[in-house]
Image: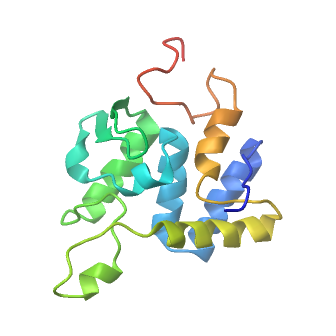
Amino acid sequence: MAEVQAIEDDDTIRMVGHLLSIRCHPQMTDMWHIGLNLALRISDLLSIRFEDIHQDRLIIRESKTGKIANIQLNTKAQQHIARLREQHPDHIYLFQSHRCQQLKNKPPQPISRRAVSMAFQQVGQELNIALGAHSMRKTQGYFPLPIHKGYRPCHENASPHI
């Protein structure tokens, strides 16, 4: 696995989102924005089901640790999730693969980690940065805990002063 970088400035964060929206499927842009707001591992992001979201909370079992994560969703994450739910009311996964729907006998699946990595790498090459699926989590960890222009950690153990 190649080393990826955190995005260290707001303009680049916005540019990544913009390039994902014009170069890749809209799901990748949604993945970027929600991933920045939740700061989860990519495996946990991809496994989110709509049934895991309860009003302003996301309750999932983290794949790496096995712990239950009870995450307060910030306003931006809630807005993105509400739009996805409205656009795809029949989806099971927040980031559901559209290819699986074309195969009649196959149950729904989330988009693949590989697809996310490839989309992010494509945009990273264009911006000359090492961008990958883990970059969202690294970017969230790069900024100090006080508010970073709309991108805030949502975990229950985040500082109450945020």
Q: Nearer the viewer, residue 95 or 112?
A: 112
In the rendered picture of this protein, how many numbered marks are placed on residues?
A: 0
Front residue of 79/143: it is: 143
Q: In this view, does 144 lie above or below 53?
A: above
- The answer to which quarter of the image holds residue 67 is top left
Residue 53: x percent and y percent? 26, 42
- Left or right side of 9 for 20: left
Residue in the picture at 70% in, 59% down: 131
Figure check: 23 above or below 88: below
Q: Residue at x 51, y 65 (%)?
A: 28
Please indicate whether residue 104 sits to the left or right of residue 87 in the image: left
Furthest residue toward top = 161
Percent of width and height locating residue 12: 75, 51
Image height check: is 43 above or below 22? Answer: above
Q: In which quarter of the image is the C terminus?
A: top right
> Residue placed farthest to the right in the image?
128
Residue at 69% from the left image edge and 31% from the top image edge? 143
Q: Identify the residue shown where x is 21% and y is 81%.
A: 106
Q: Percent from the top left, x then y, of residue 152?
A: 55, 31
Q: Horizontal placement of 8 versus 121: left or right?
A: right
User: On the rendered structure, is 108 left or right of 62?
Assistant: left
**How does the figure colour the protein chain or chains?**
rainbow
> Residue 104: x and y, percent?
18, 87
What quarter of the picture does the N terminus occupy?
Answer: bottom right
